[in-house]
Image: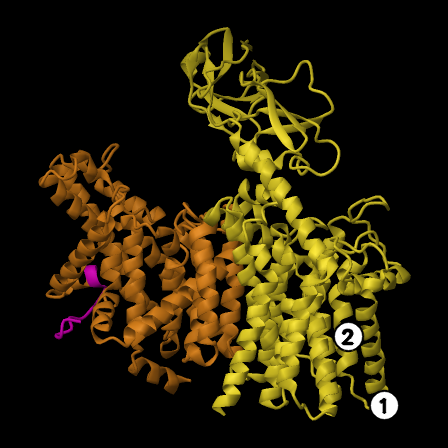
Chain colours: A yellow, B orange
Amino acid sequence: MVQKNNKNTLLILILFTFSFLSILWMLTVSNSFTFDDFTTLCNARFKTFNELFSFLPSKSYNDRPIGLMFIKVLNILFGLNYQSYHIVFGIVHFINIILVYKISKLVFDGVDEKLKIYFSVIAAAVFGIYPASLMTVSWISAVYDILCCLFTLLSLYFYLKSRINLDYCNFYALISIICFYFSIRTKEMSLTLPLIILVYELWKSLDEKKRIKLRWYLFFQLFMMVFFVLRLYLSGVKNVTPDNPYYQSFNIFSLFKNAIRYMFLYFDWGNSGFTFTDFSYGALFGVGVFGIIVIFSLYKAIKRRDFSILLSIISIGISITVVLTMVNMQHRLYLYIPSVFIGLTVAIVLYKVMSYFQFKYLWEFIIIFILCLYLVNYTPGMVGYKVNWLNYCSQDANSLKQIEKLQAPVDDTNVYVKGALEGYNIFFYGPGNSLKLMFDNQSINTILVDEFPDNPEQPYIFLDNSNNSITEVKRDMTPKALVINSIYPSQIDSETTYNKDGSLNIGVVCNIASENLKILINGEEMNTSIGKDFISTVIPKQLLKVKKIEVMVKDSKTNSISNKMIIDNN
Amino acid sequence: MENQLTYKKLNHIPWVDVYKGICIIMVVMGHAGAPFTTYIYLFHMSAFILISGFTYSGENYSFFNYLKKKVLLLLLPMICINIFYIIVYTILQRFDLYKYFQNGEPISFLNRIKLLFQWVGTPDFGGATWFLIVLFTIEILFKIFSDVCSIIRIKNLDIIVSILFSLIGWICISKGYILNYYFDLSSFGMLFFGIGVLLGRNKNIDEYIDKKVMTIFSLFIVVFFGSFYFKGQLPMNWPTRQFPSLPILILSSLCAIYLCYIISKVIETSNIFYKVFSYIGKRTYSILVFHFMAFRIIFGMLVIVKEFPIGYLKELTPRYSSGIQWLAITIVSIGICIFVSFLAQMNIIPNFIFNAKLKINKEGN
């Protein structure tokens, strides 16, 4: 018994060791911010939690508050220390691996305890170690996928717990529903989870030869699914052109073709890119094995009335359904959640196969299996992917170091960047979100230009981005001229409404929004309220006794004074 | 049902007093300027309303007896303590000391009485007593719902009705409709009261909730909202009707209340801590109504020894300080409240005003 426990413990230790080794390179300092990270971080940093969160989605795409709030928390904790972010992502990935293990144990309910552990380790290993689906862990902007997976797994886990634990049934059901809500508000990809649960219930009813029993909370989750699908759809389908990567098509043949593409992407050990490129030979082995599994599942279903493998394959399809509609892009990111069900499928298949061999040498087989999964990291595609990724990171890290050396611009600076219009560079996203982030100033405005303008708007900086080098060419930090655009009321007459004490409220719209603005009435500084689009003050009765009221605005930080506007007092 | 409740009444639930003790200490700490005030304001008022629902025993009374009980134990003491404070201010005005304690013009005794009865305009010492009128209204409303729903005989219908009724309060609050006598807050408070009654009727909460899972979940929620989402601000402020969105309010409150419950259960296992917290918990009323006065007494003492400037006497709560001043003020003010409560027990009238008790317990409880 002690020896058995030691073997089990060792197996789990090996699982986590190789999971850690698979993602180790992602936790190093080489893996810096890159691509969309600057936009994601800007959105998280410069908005309050209240601005980020809404209970229901208000747009059809990219309304994902939970992920942004998570990044905001990380930003508060770690600032721009990207290594800490990746360590946190690594921890979340490990929690996901544990959840896959636990879910698998619940799925293998009724099986011998030792076998339950072994096959659950297989499921967790496929999810946690196989590198083709782990892009999510390496990229901060993929927070939506990794967190969505976490909440999806939690929802599934508590659903399964509620089925077997009658005491806490309702409590687990409630937690499952809450986690499902969090998963939807993290990323829409989890919308189809209730369908996967339905497939599971169908399998259990067929396996146990009982009528399918649908619990009230599954109905609630199905209702939530329909509600959010309608809500997202009615929020306005984004108008994108057919050549856009996010263009969607619901044509059944396109969906099937995309499913095949994802399969090739998952098994292609020669593809070092982020997306599907072509049906290459590098994927043939994996696709071939998958094909054999499909045939085996059909055989089992038809001949043996064993639907477990077939239904688990269907679960993989359901889990990837939401992204199948994107005909122009099949991205590695989207493989993370389906790899949970791929792991479960592999575990079930191996269980069925090994049962023919009376589960002999199972422990040894699992060790070799884990090793083989890990060795995929050394295939040309995976090595190339890692090298490409780190090259982009290195390029961006180098650019960030150069930006750090620049003197911080003042508020509302216009940064003109030459040499950044073509190809990917650190100014691409925003443009210029990287500058906003590095200088912690969201008022910086970046304009990508072919040539520097002759009459740039002040204050401004000219940056030259060429030969992997960012050079400051010119800088003029003269503050932007403060201009009053309009005043309300523009004149005082018999129809003007005064306050009860005879004072008058006026509103002023300026070209600059700042908390440092003060309204001057006839040269006298007034208490000024700063609104979103205008500033205002109350002119006391005694100052309204003149025929012309002079209004100016002063920036108390820069001491600049605006033009003068007159209110005629009739 | 009656036997169960009689059983419940006779079998005092120890952790409830500890829970109340924790909550009232949090209230005083929050007013004293504790650095974790954000956490306190996540749940302190809803915690009291919930525990009142948990210990609801209205089924044992007829409506008029229950109304009488609540008038005598909530409404009248609230009025009396505020009249006491009005008298204090009147005396201060008489001896020309008012200007040291308040800005603005003095308000006559009659006007203060009018303010109290018309608008529940309490003197600042009685600033926390708004809660008593809210709780009174909640208790009576629930009693009405309970008695009416008992005719229909559907299990927990009264709870469902109360929770639905709370939506009226929420609509008023979110639309900015301020109702007299805090009726909008009372109707909204029915939500937490109803949840408390539901939990109280099921006796053992741990039979229905997986403690480990709920504790971890609650910790994450409370830390997220306390340290990040509401960082640097008050999550909610009942008397000013400042609330976050409803789902956030419910989630953060209930999770924080659950953690308070867990801590209460842990404290229950320690003899010394249990005695201290339950002693304080049994004097919740005294501390609630007197702690602002206790703050002033402390400020007065510190002014006398020249630690604070004389202008400090006008402050209702301590000014911000980076040290542990808030902790010292909390401990001393609670001590003063308990001392006053102890002294008040010796006579029926002060016992009623400061302890909301009609009888003197010879054991001094």
Counting from the top left corner in percent of width and height, residue B93 is at 16, 37
Residue at the (55%, 53%) spot, across then down: A28
**Range of residues picked out in magenta:** B353-365
Quadrant where the C terminus of chain A is found in the figure? top right
> Can the viewer see residue B149?
yes
Q: Which is the main secondary structure of the residues drawn in magenta?
A: loop
Residue at the (46%, 68%) spot, across then down: B216
Residue A422 magenta-highlighted:
no
Q: Amino acid at mark 1?
A: Lys
Residue B361 magenta-highlighted:
yes
Residue at the (22%, 38%) spot, across then down: B314
Earlier in the chain: of badge 1 and badge 2, it is 1
Vertical comparison of A373 with A120: above or below: above
Residue at the (70%, 60%) spot, across then down: A189
Vertical comparison of B319 with B237: above or below: above
The residue lying toward the viewer, choosing from A520 and A251, is A251
Dot 1 corresponds to which residue? Answer: A303
> Quick one: label 1, few (<14), some, or many (20+) residues within 10 Å?
few
Counting from the top left corner in percent of width and height, residue B203 is at 41, 80
Dot 2 corresponds to which residue? Answer: A313
Counting from the top left corner in percent of width and height, residue B46 is at 41, 61
Local SS, label 1: helix
Vertical comparison of A348 with A409: above or below: below
Letter of the chain that mark 2 sits on in the rendering? A
In the image: residue B312, left or right of residue A493: left
Cα separation, mark 1 vs mark 2, equals: 18 Å
> Quick one: label 2, few (<14), some, or many (20+) residues within 10 Å?
many
